[in-house]
Amino acid sequence: MAFRSSRAVVEPYVTRDGSEIRELMHPSVQGNLAQSLAEATVAPGDSTLLHRHRRTEEIYHFTRGSGWMILGRERLAVRAGDTVCIPPGVAHRLENTGGEPLVLLCACSPAYSHDDTELLTKD
């Protein structure tokens, strides 16, 4: 059985961390079993809120733009072509320091859930 989605028909929404997300593949929509894939966008000058996921491992693959990523105690420069793995429980956030949108693919296992997102800052 094949599962299929088209970016053109997926409506974006804002996640708890403040990024705009398009869920390209998610069990609650397409019926796949154990993971999700989304495209996230952080506008120039914006940043996401510091947060962590108790159960979910995430892989970010940056496809456009540049900025900084806080990953635990590290501060990493990120740009198109970079890939970062975020283990469960590790605090993280993105900051777009470039002049164009910072765009990334985000693979989550298990699939993304608002309930598994713990905000660590209030701003």
Image (cartoon, rainbow, N blue to C red):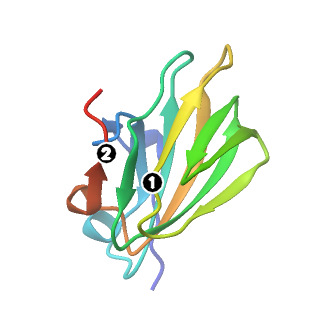
Residue 52 sits above or below residue 22 on the image: below
Rendered location of residue 4, percent (x, y) = 47, 65
Reading the image, the residue beneath label 2 is 120
Q: What residue type is labelled 2?
A: Leu
Rendered location of residue 78, percent (x, y) = 72, 40
Rendered location of residue 69, percent (x, y) = 61, 41
The residue tagged with tag 1: helix, strand or loop?
A: loop
> Which residue is pictured at 40% across the width and 34% down the height?
20
- Could you say which is closer to the camera, residue 61 or residue 11? 61
In the image, which disc is placed on residue 8? Answer: none
Q: State left or right for residue 99 relative to residue 58.
A: right
Q: Which amino acid does label 1 sit on?
A: Ala
- Could you say which is closer to the camera, residue 56 or residue 90? 90
Rendered location of residue 29, percent (x, y) = 28, 63
Image quadrant for the C terminus?
Answer: top left
Callout 2 touching callout 1 (CB < 8 Å) = yes
Residue reaching furthest to the bottom: 1
The residue tagged with tag 2: helix, strand or loop?
A: loop
Tell me how far mark 2 sits from mark 1, CA to CA: 8 Å
> Which residue is pictured at 76% across the width and 39% down the height?
80
> Which residue is pictured at 57% across the width and 43% down the height?
70
Reading the image, the residue beneath label 1 is 91
